[in-house]
Image: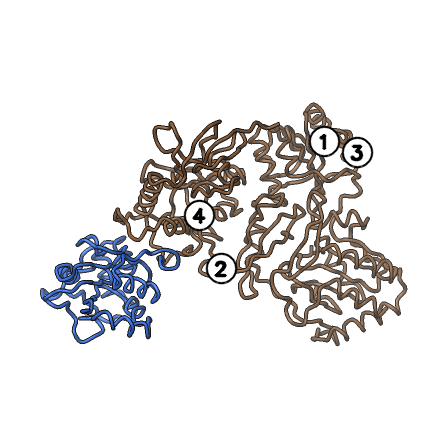
């Protein structure tokens, strides 16, 4: 059982857990101590001195964020002395660089500004010396304006502790201190992986998102909790929207990714400029023409009814939500009797367990990565592997090819040497096996030897691969002898060999949200929704069912994929 | 009871603070029953009267030698000096030029502007010389600060009403804003 201590905060008796900091104990008791450099997801640092409090028998004021509680401790958080010192700290922070709020992007949401308001700073005691400080705009998605930086080092800690990337640090000393990347190179040329975790934790306007800058403050935007749909990790996200448009994506702190996202989840979806399909299309005399839903679905139903079931095939990407995928199976396997499958591998033939979590990785002492390259396909998981390494876990990589993880591998084996890797795993106390589509059946059999000891994390090549596996869907397209093929591709970029194969099919229906070579080859095109318009659920990496929520309205004339399938079934 | 005399003047400013003052609408009429606006940049009389006023209000940044004169005159002629708006309080947007060499800034403004044809930097002995852009309290003592870009009409009304009623205004909540 945890040891408890009795302390007094502002005269109030508070019971705190031994080992808690004064700030944590106060927060748990509902007492607000202001802080700037402190962030719940990061280790306390004590850089800004805003949380200074008076502690009995301490010679000077102490930072609440780093000071541990002890039995009998008496703390004053808003005494005249504390308030005076706190105002002084704020004056010093404002005096150092350019903190003119009126043209700052963060004005209104800035934590420094909020504190200045709270402590009634109506002017500056120490006039700004107008130092010439650069702005670094070398990164694609966000800007570092050193002028707004208060050197709280949240970004540095986020980079190191959460993304395990260690790009950021400081150079120089005292007032000349600057946040810097690697060995002092422009951020855009550094080892930065643009995960944006630093951007999310920055308390001021020092890190500015290019896309959402000046697009609206916290009170003007809406936040929708959802799930990132770009890989099977299924990170929790918050979609920030204004007037029906997505302006930014942030990592959800309460979900298994604990705020961390990668460039593919945080930035790329907001920047996509691919052409949307906004209405059903039917090919007539070689040209596709706009059509009504009724015409398109009637035509499909007509063709399906007049074709033998064994000459009909239907494939979906694993990116579809649970309900859509189930409806897909119910309609095409259940009602039509067609051959159904998914486009991406589901790893089900490997017969290996799933369900290992990011927390299992962090608690592991030995991580085996085989047939996968998490740092390029499932990046947030890759960051967690690197985090585990920081805590002492050994990373064993089994791969014959180029692998982003290779630089961080403690031991690397070729695929012939799998036995050696497994032996190391067997000797570990809490091993985790991360396996991907590059694993073959024989290797899987060998890995099966670790089943009793290890947690297994499958890296499905597509978002909802877990559900496809549960539904027992076959992977791989085979259009031999098919007269009708229905493809549900959402917004994925379909590989060229798929396009080549389905071009030969006499009647091709493509259900997709963006235009591409596939929709150009189709006889009927059904428009689908984008990630931000979809509502339903999917399975994340841990096999947990997580809700996907609609953040922006569905464009007029579009219908969710599962409803389209239900409509089709009604006509059969 | 005699009306409280109030004078306002501006330095390098955009007139946003004056707009905010006018934005008090009918409350301005109510205030004028208690105060006398002796001079403002937007009325006929521009300078605070020699015999002095109780409250002096300055908006804008101290930007040149003429501004310094205005500031000093106001300080001499008022009992309580209020710096109104971000420019007068913090230096404001004008201080952005402090991050550059003064000659560079003048050249950019008078010669290199996209719409300028054959521009010259004004150099007459008779006109004021630019100085480092700075808030009012770098030149004279300021008694009360009202930040905001501009301060809202509500804030200005609150400040003047409190002063007229003999209280020191307290800026909290929506009254204290930097933008």
Residue found at x 33% / y 56%: B171
Q: In 3D space, how far apart are the residues under numbered discs 3 and 4 (Cα atoms)?
A: 50 Å
- Sequence-first tag of 4 and 2: 4
Disc 3: which residue: A445
Q: Nearer the viewer, residue B85 or A443?
A: B85
Q: In 3D space, how far apart are the residues under numbered discs 4 and 2 (Cα atoms)?
A: 17 Å
Task: Identify the colour of chain A in the image.
Answer: brown
Q: Nearer the viewer, residue A157 or A546?
A: A546
Q: In 3D space, how far apart are the residues under numbered discs 1 and 4 (Cα atoms)?
A: 40 Å
* Chain of the residue on which disc 1 is drawn: A
Q: Identify the mark at residue A219; answer none if there is no mark.
A: 2
Question: Within the image, what quadrant is residue A490 found in?
Answer: bottom right
Q: Is residue B7 visible?
A: no
Q: Are marks 4 and 2 in contact (CB under 8 Å)?
A: no
Residue found at x 65% / y 45%: A233
Disc 4: which residue: A203
Disc 1: which residue: A454
- The total number of labels drawn is 4
């Amino acid at each position: 059982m945890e040891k408890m201590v009795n302390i007094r905060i502002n005269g109030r008796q508070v019971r705190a857990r031994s080992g808690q900091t004064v700030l944590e104990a106060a927060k748990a008791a509902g007492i607000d101590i202001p802080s700037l450099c402190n962030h719940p997801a990061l280790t306390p640092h004590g850089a800004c001195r805003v949380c200074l409090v008076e502690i009995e028998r301490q010679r000077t004021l102490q930072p609440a964020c780093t000071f541990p509680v002890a039995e009998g401790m008496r703390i004053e958080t808003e005494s005249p002395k504390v308030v005076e010192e706190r105002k002084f700290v704020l004056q010093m922070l404002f005096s150092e660089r350019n903190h003119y709020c009126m043209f700052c992007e963060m004005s209104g949401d800035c934590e420094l500004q909020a504190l200045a308001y709270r402590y009634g700073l109506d002017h500056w005691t120490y006039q700004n010396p107008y130092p010439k400080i650069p702005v670094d705009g070398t990164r694609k998605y966000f800007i570092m304006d050193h002028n707004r930086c208060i050197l709280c080092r949240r970004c540095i800690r986020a980079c190191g502790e959460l993304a395990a990337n260690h790009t950021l640090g400081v150079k120089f000393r005292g007032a000349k201190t600057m946040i810097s990347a690697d060995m002092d190179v422009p951020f855009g040329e550094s080892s930065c992986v643009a995960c944006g975790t630093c951007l999310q934790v920055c308390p001021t306007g020092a890190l500015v998102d290019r896309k959402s800058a000046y697009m609206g403050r916290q009170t003007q935007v809406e936040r929708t909790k959802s799930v990132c749909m770009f890989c099977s990790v299924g990170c929790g996200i918050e979609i920030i929207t204004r007037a029906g448009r997505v302006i930014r994506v942030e990592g959800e702190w309460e979900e298994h990714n604990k705020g961390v996202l990668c460039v593919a989840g945080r930035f790329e979806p907001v920047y996509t400029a691919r052409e949307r399909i906004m209405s059903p299309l039917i090919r007539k005399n070689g040209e596709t023409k706009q059509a009504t839903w009724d015409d398109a679905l009637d035509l499909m139903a007509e063709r399906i009814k007049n074709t033998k079931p064994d000459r009909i095939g239907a494939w979906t990407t694993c990116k579809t939500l649970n309900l859509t995928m189930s409806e897909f199976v119910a309609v095409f396997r259940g009602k039509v009797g067609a051959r159904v499958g998914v486009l991406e591998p589901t790893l089900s033939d490997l017969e290996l367990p799933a369900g290992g979590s990011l927390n299992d990785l962090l608690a592991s002492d030995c991580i085996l990565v085989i047939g996968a390259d998490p740092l390029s396909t499932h990046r947030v998981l890759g960051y967690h592997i690197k985090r585990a390494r920081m805590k002492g876990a050994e990373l064993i990589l089994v791969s014959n090819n180029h692998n982003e993880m290779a630089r961080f591998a403690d031991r690397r084996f070729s695929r012939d040497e799998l036995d050696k890797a497994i032996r190391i795993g067997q000797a570990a106390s809490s091993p985790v096996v991360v396996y991907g589509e590059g694993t073959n059946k024989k290797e899987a059999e060998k890995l099966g030897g670790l089943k009793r000891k290890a947690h297994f994390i499958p890296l499905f090549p597509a978002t909802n691969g877990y559900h496809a596996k549960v539904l027992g869907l076959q992977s791989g397209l085979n259009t031999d002898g098919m007269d009708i093929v229905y493809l549900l591709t959402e917004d994925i970029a379909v590989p060229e060999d798929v396009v080549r194969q389905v071009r030969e099919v006499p009647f091709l229906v493509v259900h997709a949200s963006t235009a591409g070579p596939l929709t150009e080859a189709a006889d009927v095109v059904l428009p689908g929704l984008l990630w931000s318009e979809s509502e339903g659920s999917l399975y994340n990496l841990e096999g947990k069912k997580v809700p996907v929520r609609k953040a922006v309205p569905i464009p007029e004339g579009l219908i969710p994929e599962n409803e389209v399938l239900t409509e089709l079934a009604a006509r059969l | 009871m005699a009306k409280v005399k109030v004078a306002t003047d501006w330095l390098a400013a955009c007139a946003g603070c004056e707009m905010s003052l006018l934005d008090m609408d009918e409350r301005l009429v109510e205030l004028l029953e208690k105060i006398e606006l002796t001079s403002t940049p937007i009325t006929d009389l521009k300078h605070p009267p020699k015999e002095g006023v109780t409250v002096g209000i300055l908006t804008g940044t101290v930007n040149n030698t003429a501004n310094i004169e205005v500031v000093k005159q106001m300080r001499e002629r008022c009992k309580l000096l209020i710096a109104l708006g971000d420019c007068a309080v913090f230096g404001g947007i004008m201080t952005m030029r402090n991050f550059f060499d003064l000659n560079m800034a003048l050249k950019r403004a008078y010669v290199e502007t996209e719409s300028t044809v054959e521009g010259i930097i004004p150099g007459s002995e008779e006109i004021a010389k630019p100085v480092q852009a700075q808030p009012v309290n770098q030149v004279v003592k300021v008694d009360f600060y009202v930040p905001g870009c501009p301060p809202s009409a509500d804030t200005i009304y609150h400040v003047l009403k409190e002063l007229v009623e003999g209280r020191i205004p307290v800026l909290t909540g929506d009254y204290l804003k930097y933008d």
